[in-house]
Image (cartoon, coloured by chain):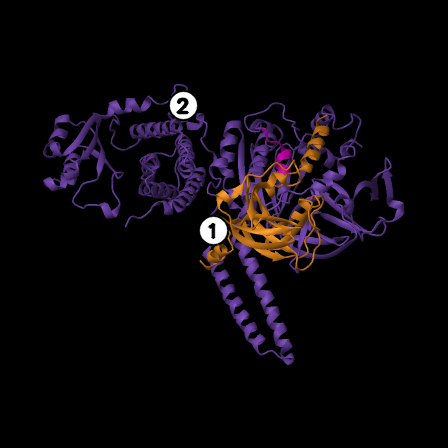
Chain colours: A purple, B orange
């Protein structure tokens, strides 16, 4: 029976990506010089298992590449090679390269061979260099022979055994043996008396060609043999390196565009699977068991029900409700992942960018175990990386600047995640220079967003950095000039039902706080009545609900209605008008209720007939079978089985603001 | 087999793809039965704001949100009356963005019939009447004309992302 290895590929990819993450964080944690052997061991193990796995599953290119990595790490592990910054850089580059290769194998796209060759050459140079400098017996890496030994199938039948030949060769010098497993047939086609293997041998040292020929003398007629001096091979290896990269390739793979940085590389190509803690599954199974017991208890009760057992029925139903709720929570829990999935990419990002910008930065991570919905985790990664990049580029000053300002030359970036209420808060803060208010003001005036004599409150001024196309950077740098602005960050966060806040102090640093709902599947909603229809407003968007009095109402050019709330004039949206609801609704503004809502930092009043209960609702997609509807973000199913639509507050607010002057201009 | 014999006895064509026929006013229509997911009674729907009149709203179909279209209103035939005996046919359609499930309201379902391909004639030129573009052919059934509907075309909803326009405007005004 042939085993289809492809069924294990997904697991292999996942494990390999995890291995790469371990290697990456291990490498970033390595101090140069005397490294912690345990750390190197961990990196080595990850590389080793990846090599084994990729060879098993037939990803020979990956296995080949991982082999070089492993060799290098092995030497470090045994103390034969010092841990230098250059080596770490090269290894990090190799990790990127491996990640790209895995991604390519996974999605079936071709591997970027040029990049692989460059990284491989960098590793090989490093290997060669190290051998000279290390304490190990100085052998010229280029002295010796490469032997490609491909026996014919009938080798064993002629009474020969490759092991003996290899032993003989090992007596001549240091021998490296690599077996080529690619020709192995599946187990049911395998004839154990045939030889399917081929080997690539490297024999180092001053060895005469004649000695090699003698070792293979008995098998000459039963194999294909190619013997080449290693020096020739080294010359060949150097060729594919593009000229501009050649000088740097020795130790600096950074000059190669990293094929896939953490940003794109770890994006889940398969998309589908999730690794779940077995404890969570056990809990689910337990709850299902409980549920079945409750159900059978109720069933029994139903068969012989009499009114005097009403109390029993009620307690049974209460139990059912408890279990259903617990089951729902547990199911949701399966989708929860610790935020360390995103945080773990940051050290690499900070390492790379601070290096490029010549800044010294310490990254501190807190609350990495805080759990978030998988979808949220996936979608928050990009905005978060953008914020960190921003901190590095705009926030943290150069070491010199910092010293002049009386601060330590090493800047601090703090990433912190914690729960607050039903939300999760992620903070990105730095102790850099803070936002430059005068420059933002000048820029805003230049862009026509503010009048030159305006005196906006600081919060409103800082809020401008979230405006599309707004950048205070004097020049677009390699780091931040990627066409993604803070407006996109804000939009992405709001798409997740969250919001972003900014606090900054000149000379002391800035803090961006992202508030996100714990999950995208459930939201706390406020049911509101409009005519005979029921809508759900997300609780996070509601500031307060008020009933209006005449004296607070104004009209604007005869039709736009506004109301005054603590000195602020806010537009009113009559939901029944916007949605064309017929019949039964309050006509006068003083008859209904006004829900003060906020979306994308803008406020408005939503006029509804009444607010009903607050409840958690499960969000269902309206687009799956229908299409996007203006002012609606989704649907949910109410207790009676009917469908209620969920209001898209930012969309409605935009709608209300549409015919009004841009708010920042008043 | 029995069914086929029955059909033969009635002089109807045998074999070929099966179709579900239904009635709209005085007219008879047919859809490929493989597209029919289920047939349900009428239940109140939740209205969709600012949707065309024939898009009645959405219902909860075992956890999925499914839109309901009134074919009688869509084709301007029959009376859009809703009683517990009103019939909703749930159809599966293939759209560019993947398969979608939708329900259509009809006056009554009639029969399941075999319509061999050669029994179907191309639709004549209806002169651009409402719904003509959704008819992929007509067939004669016991002397009655049945119009075969193209489910995918019929249930293709125009995207109307009105908000993006507002968004574009907002961004435009911000840039000036």
Q: Neighbour class for label 2 at 10 Å: few (<14), some, many (≥20)?
A: some
Give percent across and percent down for residue A128: 30, 28
The answer to if A489 sits in the magenta stretch is: yes
Q: Where A246 falls versus A546 (above or below)? A: above
Q: Neighbour class for label 1 at 10 Å: few (<14), some, many (≥20)?
A: some
Q: Quadrant of residue A490?
A: top right
Q: Range of the magenta residues?
A: A483-491
SS at circle 1: loop
Q: Chain of mark 1?
A: B
* Residue nearest the observer in this picture, A56 or A424: A56
Residue that numbered label 1 is attached to? B14
* Residue nearest the observer in this picture, A230 or A221: A221
Give percent across and percent down for residue B24: 65, 50
Q: Chain of mark 2?
A: A
* Residue nearest the observer in this picture, A575 or A322: A575
Is residue A420 shown to the viewer in this render?
Answer: no
Left or right of A288? Residue A459 is: right
* Residue nearest the observer in this picture, B80 or A408: B80
Q: Nearer the viewer, mark 2 or mark 1?
A: 1
Is residue A344 shown to the viewer in this render?
Answer: yes
Residue that numbered label 2 is attached to? A248
- Quarter of the rendering occupied by the C terminus of chain A: top right
Q: Are marks 2 and 1 on the same chain?
A: no
Give percent across and percent down for residue A219: 12, 34
The answer to if A637 sits in the magenta stretch is: no
Q: CA distance from mark 2 to mark 1?
A: 77 Å
SS at circle 2: helix
Left or right of A134? Residue A535 is: right
């Amino acid at each position: 029976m042939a085993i289809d290895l492809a069924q294990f590929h997904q697991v292999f990819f996942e494990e390999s990506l995890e291995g790469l993450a371990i290697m990456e964080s291990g490498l970033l944690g390595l101090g140069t010089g005397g490294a912690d052997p345990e750390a190197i061991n961990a990196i080595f193990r990850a590389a080793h298992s990846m090599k084994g796995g990729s060879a098993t599953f037939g990803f020979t290119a990956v296995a080949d590449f991982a082999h070089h990595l492993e060799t290098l790490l092995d030497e470090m592990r045994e103390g034969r090679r010092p841990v230098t910054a250059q080596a770490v850089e090269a290894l990090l580059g190799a990790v990127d390269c491996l990640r790209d290769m895995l991604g390519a194998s996974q999605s079936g796209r071709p591997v970027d061979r040029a990049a692989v060759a460059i990284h491989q050459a960098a590793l090989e140079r490093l290997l060669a260099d190290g051998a000279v400098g290390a304490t190990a017996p100085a052998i010229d890496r280029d002295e010796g022979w490469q032997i490609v030994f491909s026996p014919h199938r009938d080798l064993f039948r002629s009474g020969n055994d490759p092991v003996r030949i290899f032993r003989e060769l090992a007596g001549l010098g240091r021998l490296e043996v690599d077996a080529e497993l690619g020709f192995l047939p599946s187990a049911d086609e395998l004839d154990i008396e045939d030889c399917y293997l081929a080997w690539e041998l490297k024999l180092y040292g001053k060895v005469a060609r004649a000695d090699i020929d003698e070792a293979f003398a008995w098998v000459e007629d039963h194999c294909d043999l190619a013997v080449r001096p290693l020096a020739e091979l080294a010359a060949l290896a150097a060729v594919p390196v593009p000229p501009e990269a050649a000088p740097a390739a020795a130790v600096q793979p950074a000059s190669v565009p990293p094929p896939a940085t953490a940003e794109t590389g770890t994006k889940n190509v398969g998309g589908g699977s999730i690794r779940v803690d077995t404890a969570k599954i056990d809990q689910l199974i337990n709850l299902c068991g409980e549920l079945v017991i409750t159900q059978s208890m109720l069933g029994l009760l139903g068969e012989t029900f009499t009114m005097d057992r009403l109390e029993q029925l009620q307690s049974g139903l209460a139990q059912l409700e408890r279990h259903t709720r617990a089951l729902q929570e547990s199911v949701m829990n399966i989708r929860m992942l610790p935020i360390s999935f995103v945080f773990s990419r940051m050290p690499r990002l900070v390492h790379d960018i601070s290096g490029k910008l010549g800044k010294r930065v310490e990254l501190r991570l807190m609350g990495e175990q805080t759990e978030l919905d998988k979808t949220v985790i996936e979608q928050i990664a990009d905005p978060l990386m953008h914020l960190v990049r921003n901190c590095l580029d705009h926030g943290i000053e150069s070491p010199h600047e910092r010293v002049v300002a009386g601060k330590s030359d090493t800047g601090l970036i703090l990433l912190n995640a914690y729960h607050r209420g039903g939300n999760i808060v992620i903070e990105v803060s730095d102790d850099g220079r803070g936002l430059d208010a005068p420059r933002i003001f000048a820029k805003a005036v230049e862009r026509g967003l503010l009048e030159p004599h305006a005196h906006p409150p600081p919060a409103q001024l800082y809020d401008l950095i979230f405006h599309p196309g707004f950048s205070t950077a004097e020049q677009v740098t390699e780091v931040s000039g990627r066409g993604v602005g803070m407006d996109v960050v804000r939009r992405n966060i709001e798409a997740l039902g969250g919001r972003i806040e900014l606090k900054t102090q000149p000379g002391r640093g800035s803090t961006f706080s992202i508030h996100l709902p714990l999950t995208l599947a459930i939201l706390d909603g406020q049911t509101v009545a409009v005519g005979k229809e029921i809508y759900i407003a997300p609780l996070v968007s509601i500031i307060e609900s008020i009933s209006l009095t005449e004296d607070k109402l104004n009209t604007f050019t005869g039709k736009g209605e506004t109301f005054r709330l603590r000195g602020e004039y806010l537009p009113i949206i009559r939901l029944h008008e916007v949605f064309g609801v017929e019949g039964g609704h309050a006509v006068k503004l003083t008859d209904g209720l006004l829900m003060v809502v906020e979306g994308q930092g803008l406020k408005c009043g939503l006029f509804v007939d009444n607010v009903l209960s607050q409840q958690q609702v499960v969000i269902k997609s309206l687009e799956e079978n229908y299409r996007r509807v203006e002012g609606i973000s989704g649907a949910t199913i109410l207790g009676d089985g009917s469908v209620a639509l969920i209001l898209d507050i930012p969309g409605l607010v935009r709608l209300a603001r549409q015919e009004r002057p841009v708010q920042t201009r008043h | 087999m029995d069914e086929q014999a029955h059909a033969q006895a009635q002089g109807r064509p045998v074999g070929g793809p099966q179709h579900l026929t239904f009635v709209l006013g005085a007219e008879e229509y047919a859809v490929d039965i493989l597209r029919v997911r289920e047939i349900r009674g009428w239940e109140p729907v939740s209205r969709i704001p600012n949707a065309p009149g024939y898009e009645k709203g959405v219902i909860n179909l075992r956890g999925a949100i499914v839109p309901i279209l009134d074919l009688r209103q869509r084709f301007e035939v029959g009376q859009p009356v809703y009683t517990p005996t009103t019939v909703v046919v749930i159809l599966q359609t293939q759209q560019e963005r993947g398969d979608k499930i939708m329900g259509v309201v009809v006056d009554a379902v009639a029969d399941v019939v075999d319509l061999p391909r050669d029994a179907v004639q191309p639709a004549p030129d209806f002169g651009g009447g409402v719904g003509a573009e959704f008819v992929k052919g007509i067939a004669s059934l016991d002397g009655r004309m049945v119009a075969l509907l193209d489910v995918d075309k019929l249930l293709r909803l125009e995207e109307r992302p009105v908000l993006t326009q507002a968004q574009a405007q907002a961004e435009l005004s911000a840039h000036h």
